[in-house]
Image (cartoon, rainbow, N blue to C red):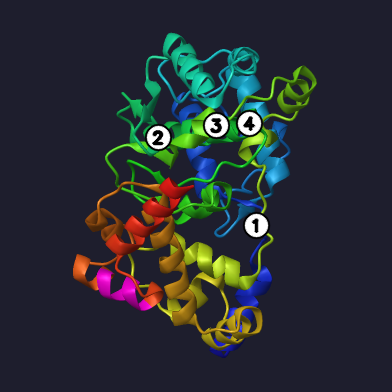
């Protein structure tokens, strides 16, 4: 079979991105598995056949994933699925939400939410940090087991960001998403949810965003809260879809691999298409080649980080995969006609003038 035929065959067998990678599913189940629960029995109750998760390349449809989460919560009587040293009783999240919709703005809601969970759990804490321009919500933990730590850090950050967006009734733009753990093949599952550069092996797990967002008002609507809680866990865990074009999927792959030198062939293999097909689709959708699209991705992320953060230029350069600041300077000048420092100064002056 030719390379092109093999790629078409793989593409025909590739499930939609709206399904969940079984590696991620395995992390969710890790606490229950270590506690000795009958995982097959639990999965059957969620409508998942024995061995369905064992087949290579299998992805779990979002509806089944949501049922699995709901079943797991009922069976464990724990809103974090036996991942912590003691359970979080069902109803805890609901009670916190009822407190938060009475807050004035997002800043107050985050602070009260952090205090609430500090009283409930011992294994992790969520905190808010404010700078002059940027803010972050970050997670600290006392979990030694790697899989549990990864799942708790990831789940708490996802719940927190999803709840923040719901409280103010809009998607909040993020500067970056940071994780303390390393990247895995299933790490891409949440890229469509955050829509921001995801950085791994970082000092702490956090989301960074413009500090001005903390002043957004909370939408205190009891009926809206009722509908939100009735739709859990779908409302936070599987609320996103990736029905995007090939060009958007290429952008997502490049954003997730900023520090790696991704070639056209690498991306084509990830998408299970031939390099020729990928090249043709990019020209059809974007009227540009792969390298130009790659430059656009790095340019857009660079300008976003220069506008929205006070990160040192060296840190931005490293985040974008540049080994030296001078190389970043040359590339940025080629993209914009300005050095990174000049671009940041002009944006700051324009913002002050407004």
Taking the image as drawn, is residue 150 in sight? yes
At mark 3, the secondary structure is: helix
Asked whether, in this view, residue 212 is left or right of residue 204, the answer is right
Q: CA distance from mark 3 to mark 2?
A: 15 Å
Q: CA distance from mark 3 to mark 4?
A: 15 Å
- Single out the mark in the foreground, 3 or 2: 2
At mark 4, the secondary structure is: helix
Magenta region: 329-334
Q: Quadrant of the N terminus?
A: bottom right
**Which residue shows up at 69% across the image and 60% down it?**
243
Numbered tag placed on residue 242 in the rendering = 1
Circle 1 residues within 10 Å: few <14, some 14–19, many ≥20: some
Circle 2 residues within 10 Å: few <14, some 14–19, many ≥20: many
- Single out the mark in the foreground, 1 or 4: 4
**Which residue shows up at 44% across the image and 9% down it?**
119
Q: CA distance from mark 1 to mark 4?
A: 23 Å
User: Does label 3 or label 2 sit earlier along the sequence?
Assistant: 2
Circle 3 residues within 10 Å: few <14, some 14–19, many ≥20: some
Q: CA distance from mark 3 to mark 1?
A: 19 Å
Rendering coords of residue 104 (x, y %): 59, 18
Q: Which residue is mark 3?
A: 159
């Amino acid at each position: 079979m030719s390379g092109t035929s093999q790629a078409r065959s793989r593409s025909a067998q590739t499930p939609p991105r709206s399904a969940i990678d079984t590696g991620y599913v395995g992390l969710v189940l890790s606490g229950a598995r270590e506690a000795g629960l009958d995982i097959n029995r639990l999965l059957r109750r969620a409508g998942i056949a024995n061995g369905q998760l064992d087949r290579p390349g299998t992805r779990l449809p979002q509806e089944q994933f949501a049922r699995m989460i709901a079943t797991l919560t009922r069976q464990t009587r724990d809103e974090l699925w036996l991942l912590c040293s003691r359970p979080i009783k069902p109803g805890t999240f609901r009670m916190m939400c009822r407190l938060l919709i009475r807050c004035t703005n997002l800043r107050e809601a985050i602070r009260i939410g952090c205090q609430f969970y500090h009283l409930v759990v011992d294994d992790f804490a969520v905190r808010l940090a404010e700078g002059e321009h940027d803010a972050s919500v970050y997670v600290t933990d006392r979990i030694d087991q790697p899989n549990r730590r990864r799942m708790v850090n990831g789940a708490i950050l996802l719940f927190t960001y999803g709840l923040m967006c719901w409280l103010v009734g809009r998607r909040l733009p993020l500067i970056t998403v940071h994780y303390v753990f390393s990247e895995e093949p299933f790490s891409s599952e949440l890229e469509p949810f955050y829509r921001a550069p995801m950085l791994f092996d970082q000092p702490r797990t956090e989301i960074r965003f413009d500090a001005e967002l903390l002043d957004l008002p909370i939408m205190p609507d009891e009926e809206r809260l009722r509908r939100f809680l009735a739709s859990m866990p779908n409302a936070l865990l599987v609320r996103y879809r990736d029905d995007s074009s090939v060009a958007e999927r290429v952008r997502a792959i490049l954003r997730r691999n900023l520090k790696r030198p991704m070639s056209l062939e690498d991306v084509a293999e990830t998408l299970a298409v031939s390099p020729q097909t990928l090249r043709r689709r990019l020209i059809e959708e974007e009227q540009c080649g792969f390298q130009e699209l790659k430059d656009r991705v790095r340019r857009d992320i660079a300008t976003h980080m220069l506008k929205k953060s006070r990160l040192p230029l060296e840190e931005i350069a490293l985040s974008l995969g540049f080994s030296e600041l001078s190389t970043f300077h040359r590339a940025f000048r080629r993209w914009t006609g300005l050095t990174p420092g000049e671009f940041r100064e002009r944006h700051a002056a324009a913002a002050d003038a407004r």
